[in-house]
Amino acid sequence: MWYNNILETIGNTPLVRLNAITKDVKATVLAKIETTNPGNSIKDRMAVKMIEDAERDGRLKPGGTIIEGTSGNTGMGLAIAAVIKGYRCIFTTTDKQSKEKVDALRAFGAEVIVCPTNVDPEDPRSYYSVSTRLEREVPNSWKPNQYDNLSNSKAHYEQTGPEIWEQTEGKITHLVVGVGTGGTISGAGKYLKEKNPNIKVWGIDTYGSVFKKYKETGEFDKNEIYPYITEGIGEDFLPKNVDFDVIDRFEKVTDKDAALMTREIARKEGIFAGNSAGSALAGLMQLKGELKEGDIVVIIFHDHGSRYMGKMYNEDWLRERGFLADEKLTAKSILSR
Ligand code: PMP
C-alpha cells in the first residue's frame, strides 16, 4: 500500500484524549492533532481545496503563480501542493511571524517577502497590499485569498467535520477552535451542527482582535484592535470565512496564558503543539465550569511546536515579555529547591 504523492496523506488526523491538564474538567476532552499533515498543520487541507477548486473553474492555469499573504501554515500547504502540481509560489508575510515558518516556506522553493506588522491593511507596505499589487503585476498569477475564499471553510465541511463526527461516533457535544480566517470553525462546525444541532461551537479569540465583541454586539469596534503576540488566531477585520451563525460564543485568551498553556501541553500531555493550541486549551479551561459529566469536547490543535522554538519554547523569549517570573536554571538553583 502506498500513496501516489504526499498530498494524499493529508487528513485523517488522530484524536487524542487529554488527561493531565484537563483532569478536573468534568467532560472528556479530545484533541484533534493536525501536526501529522505533511505541512504539519491543518491548513494543508484548505490549501489543496482552494487550489483544486481554482484549477477546476480556470482561475489557476497550468504553470501559474500562486500569490498569497500568509502567516506560514497556509503557505506551507500551498507550497507543498505547488511542488506536486508545478506552480510557482510568492508569499508575503509579516515580521511578527517566526523565522522558522519563513525558512520552511523557502525550503519548498517558495519566494517570501516579509512586510511590517504594525501598519493598517490599506497601507501599501502591509502584507495584504503587497500581495494584491503582485497579483496585479505578475502574469498568470492567482491569489487564493484564504480569508474570503469559501473553499477554505468547505475543506473543513468536507473533511475535518466528518472526521470528527466519525471519530467520536457522533457523540461530540462541543467543538472548541481558535479562529483566524474562520475556515476551520465555520466548516467543521456547520457540518457537525447539521448532524446534531445541539452541538455547541466555541470560538477562541485573542485580546487585540475583533471577533468576540462583534459576535456579542454586532459592532465592529476599532478599539478592540491592538498588536498581540499570539499567532494564527484573531483578526482586525471580518473574513468571509467566519460564519458567526455557526459559532455560539467566543472566549478571549491573553498572550501570556496562551504561551504558557502551549508549553504545558508538551510538558503534561507529551504533545508538541503550536501557539494556537495553547490559546484554544486555555480558552476551554476558562469555560470549564460550563461542561458536565458525559460531555465530549473536541479541541483543534492546528499546528506543530517546532515552528515556535524561538518563541514560547524559548525561556529567554518568555522572560523578555514577562511571561516567566522564575530565575534562570543553574545547578545551584536546582540543588537549593
Ligand atoms: N492556528 C494556527 C497556527 C493557524 O495558522 C491558523 C490559521 N490562521 C489558525 C489557528 C486558525 O484557523 P482558521 O484560519 O481556519 O480559522
Image (cartoon, grey):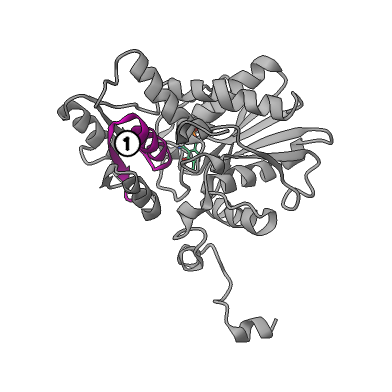
* Viewer can see residue 196: yes
Identify the image quadrant of residue 82. top left
Is 29 in the magenta? no
Residue 280 picture location, percent across and down: 60, 42
Identify the image quadrant of residue 285. top right
Q: Which residues are magenta?
A: 69-95
Name the residue located 73 percent from the left edge and 40 percent from the top edge. Answer: 29
- Circle 1: residue type: Gly
The quarter of the picture where the C terminus appears is: bottom right
Q: Vertically, is 330 above or below 135?
A: below
Drawn side of residue 159 relative to residue 26, left or right: left
Name the residue located 34 percent from the left edge and 18 percent from the top edge. Answer: 55
- Label 1 crowd bin: few (<14), some (14–19), many (20+), radius 10 Å: many
Drawn side of residue 140 relative to residue 175, left or right: left
Residue 171 picture location, percent across and down: 77, 26
Front in this rendered view, residue 147 or 166? 166
* Number of numbered callouts drawn: 1
Drawn side of residue 139 relative to residue 265, left or right: left
Front in this rendered view, residue 254 or 32? 32
User: What residue sits right under mark 1 in the picture?
Assistant: 69
Residue 166 picture location, percent across and down: 70, 25
> Under tag 1, what secondary structure?
strand
Is 78 in the magenta? yes
Front in this rendered view, residue 99 or 94? 99
* Viewer can see residue 180: no
Name the residue located 66 percent from the left edge and 28 percent from the top edge. Answer: 164
